[in-house]
Image: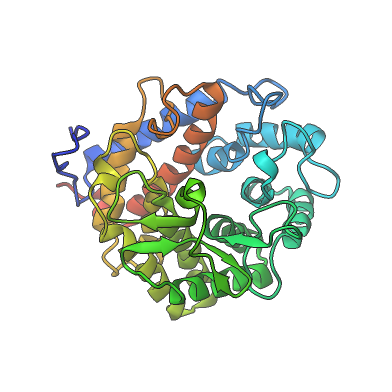
């Protein structure tokens, strides 16, 4: 079994899928699903919903993780209690925090609704999401009051693009592809740093130190927001599959190369789980681009998720940012990792190598 390394060691990550690894991935995914299910009331209400929205990704995670019944119960509760008739989040504890736009929270709910056949809910959510996409650039606005500051963000744009793929919204997906292509082309310091925000046609490269974690990723440094290339690649892989656009696959490879060329601390730092979306992106690219060299990275990340899971089945956020996680912290992170690990498992099981012995 692989163990987490110290700052001065390198973890011997696996590069080939084996039956044992697939079994452990499956067991970790099932334990995570069970942990989430245990915190859903009979009426679908997730624990802690009266305090904050830590549940937004759980219905999607439960769908792809093997518990669509629990996902349906939660979406039914959300339709009754947490969503407006227009498909937005109700104010208060159900809304996205800190004045941010609801894109990152609503997009997973649109995905879950579509997967569950709740097409009216998905359509109403998509109507709200469309208000938060810049029609000129294709980027997703970072703030709910984007008229005050029209900042656009890589994380929200790629997430919006992914739900557009699932729900068949080609116009929105085209915009997200356009934004991700332009943003990478405008970067001044690749492969070392990725600037993740724009205002219209302008890349944001100057910002206060206190917002640097959100605005730039230095792949040579520890404790960065390493997830940005992974979510971009997850969308681009699906976009290439739907459109047969080979340039989207090339763009996905370029995004993932920022991670694969970066510091090993992305994987080995026991205080950080910021690499998690790279696993999703690598798995999506493996499915869309099976000869692109993504298999070893997908295998590595499958092992990474298994190793980072707590004994009770939950996953915790990065301890450098959240040293004492509470239930709400564990809930959103476990839902995220169940979703990501499920896509890794799907990708590995669909490869011929995924069923062979070591």
Inspect this view and state whether residue 22 appears.
no
Question: For the point 44% across and 26% down, which residue is it?
Answer: 314
Q: Nearer the viewer, residue 49 or 303?
A: 49
Residue 196: x and y in percent read 49, 61
Q: Residue 253's quadrant in the figure?
A: bottom left
Residue 191: x and y in percent read 31, 67
Q: Nearer the viewer, residue 167 or 66?
A: 167
The relative height of residue 309 versus residue 266 in the rendered view (above or below) is above
The answer to whether residue 148 is left or right of residue 278 is right
Residue 152: x and y in percent read 61, 62
Residue 39: x and y in percent read 58, 21
Q: Residue 2's quadrant in the figure?
A: top left
Inspect this view and state whether residue 172 appears.
yes
Question: For the point 69% across and 27% down, which residue is it?
Answer: 44
The answer to whether residue 31 is left or right of residue 208 is left
Q: Quadrant of the N terminus?
A: top left
Question: For the point 40% across and 43% down, which residue is it?
Answer: 341
Number of marks:
0
The relative height of residue 271 versus residue 178 in the rendered view (above or below) is above
Q: Nearer the viewer, residue 225 or 338?
A: 225
The answer to whether residue 295 is left or right of residue 247 is left
Question: For the point 19% across and 32% down, which residue is it?
Answer: 3
Q: Residue 304's quadrant in the figure?
A: top left
The answer to whether residue 128 is left or right of residue 334 is right
The colour scheme of the drawn protein is rainbow
The relative height of residue 207 versus residue 23 in the rendered view (above or below) is below
Q: Nearer the viewer, residue 323 or 13?
A: 323
């Amino acid at each position: 079994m692989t163990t987490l390394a110290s700052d001065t060691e390198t973890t011997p990550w696996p590069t080939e899928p084996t039956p044992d690894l697939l079994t452990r991935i499956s067991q970790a995914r099932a334990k995570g699903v069970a942990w989430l299910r245990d915190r859903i009331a009979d009426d679908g209400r997730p624990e802690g919903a009266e305090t904050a929205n830590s549940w937004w990704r759980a219905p999607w995670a439960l769908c792809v993780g093997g518990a669509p019944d629990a996902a349906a119960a939660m979406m039914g509760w959300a339709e009754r209690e947490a969503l407006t008739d227009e498909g937005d989040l109700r104010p208060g504890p159900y809304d996205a925090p800190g004045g941010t736009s609801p894109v990152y929270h609503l997009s997973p709910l649109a995905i879950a609704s579509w997967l569950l056949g709740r097409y009216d809910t998905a359509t109403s959510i998509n109507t709200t999401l469309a208000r938060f996409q810049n029609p000129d650039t294709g980027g997703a606005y970072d703030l709910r009051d984007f008229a005050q500051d029209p900042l656009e963000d890589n994380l929200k744009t790629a997430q919006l693009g992914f739900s557009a793929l699932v729900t068949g919204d080609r116009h929105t997906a085209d915009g997200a592809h356009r934004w991700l292509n332009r943003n990478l082309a405008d970067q001044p310091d690749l492969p070392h740093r990725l600037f993740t925000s724009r205002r219209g046609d302008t890349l944001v490269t100057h910002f206060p130190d206190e917002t640097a974690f959100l605005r730039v990723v230095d792949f040579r440094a520890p404790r960065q927001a390493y997830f940005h290339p992974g979510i971009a690649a997850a969308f681009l892989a699906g976009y290439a599959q739907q459109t047969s656009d080979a340039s989207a696959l090339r763009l996905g490879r370029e995004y993932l190369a920022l991670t694969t060329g970066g510091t090993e601390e992305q994987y080995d730092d026991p205080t950080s789980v910021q690499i998690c979306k790279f696993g999703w992106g690598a798995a999506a690219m493996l499915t869309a681009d099976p000869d692109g060299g993504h298999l070893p990275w997908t295998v590595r990340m499958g092992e990474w998720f298994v190793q980072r899971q707590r004994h009770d089945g939950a996953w915790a956020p990065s301890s450098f940012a959240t040293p004492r996680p509470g239930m709400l912290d564990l809930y959103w992170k476990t839902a995220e990792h169940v979703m990501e690990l499920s896509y890794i498992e799907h990708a590995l099981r669909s490869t011929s190598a995924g069923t062979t012995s070591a």
